[in-house]
Image (cartoon, grey):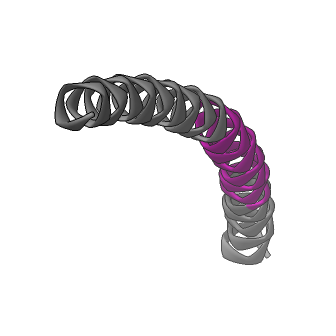
Amino acid sequence: SSRGGGKENHGNLNTSLKSQRKHTQALHAITDISNNLGNKSLKKSMDTQHGKLVGLLGSIHLTIVYLKIKLSQFEFN
């Protein structure tokens, strides 16, 4: 009976290891998915920030052009 018990424990250990492997694989899959979503979210955020920066630089450029025009008018008057 002790032999039978030993085999049973061995079987339980194998089942436990298989289960653990499946959990590990699932965790890796979840991590990959969340990293991918995070990266997409980060890229979207960076694209948004880049767009805002481009818009801001455009506004600054227009302001400088406007001020140069005003300054040149002022100098001529």
The quadrant the C terminus occupies is bottom right
- For the residue pair 66 and 75, the one nearer the viewer reads as 66
Question: Is residue 25 toward the left or the right of residue 42 in the image?
Answer: left
Q: How many numbered marks have been drawn onto this rendered protein structure?
A: 0
List the single residue furthest toward the front: 1
- For the residue pair 7 and 70, the one nearer the viewer reads as 7
Q: Quadrant of residue 74?
A: bottom right
Q: Main secondary structure of the magenta part?
A: helix
Image height of 63 relative to 18, above or below: below
Q: Is residue 76 magenta?
A: no
Question: What's drawn in magenta, residue-wise?
Answer: 36-59
Q: Is residue 53 magenta?
A: yes
Q: Quadrant of residue 38?
A: top right
Q: Image point 52% across, 36% down: which residue?
A: 23
Q: Quadrant of residue 62?
A: bottom right
Q: Image point 73% across, 67% down: which residue?
A: 76
Q: Image point 69% across, 54% down: which residue?
A: 49
The quadrant the N terminus occupies is top left
- For the residue pair 60 and 20, the one nearer the viewer reads as 20
Q: Image point 73% across, 69% down: which residue?
A: 67
- For the residue pair 4 and 33, the one nearer the viewer reads as 4
Residue 53, percent across and down? 66, 54
Residue 30, percent across and down? 62, 36
Residue 55, percent across and down? 79, 50
Residue 70, percent across and down? 80, 69
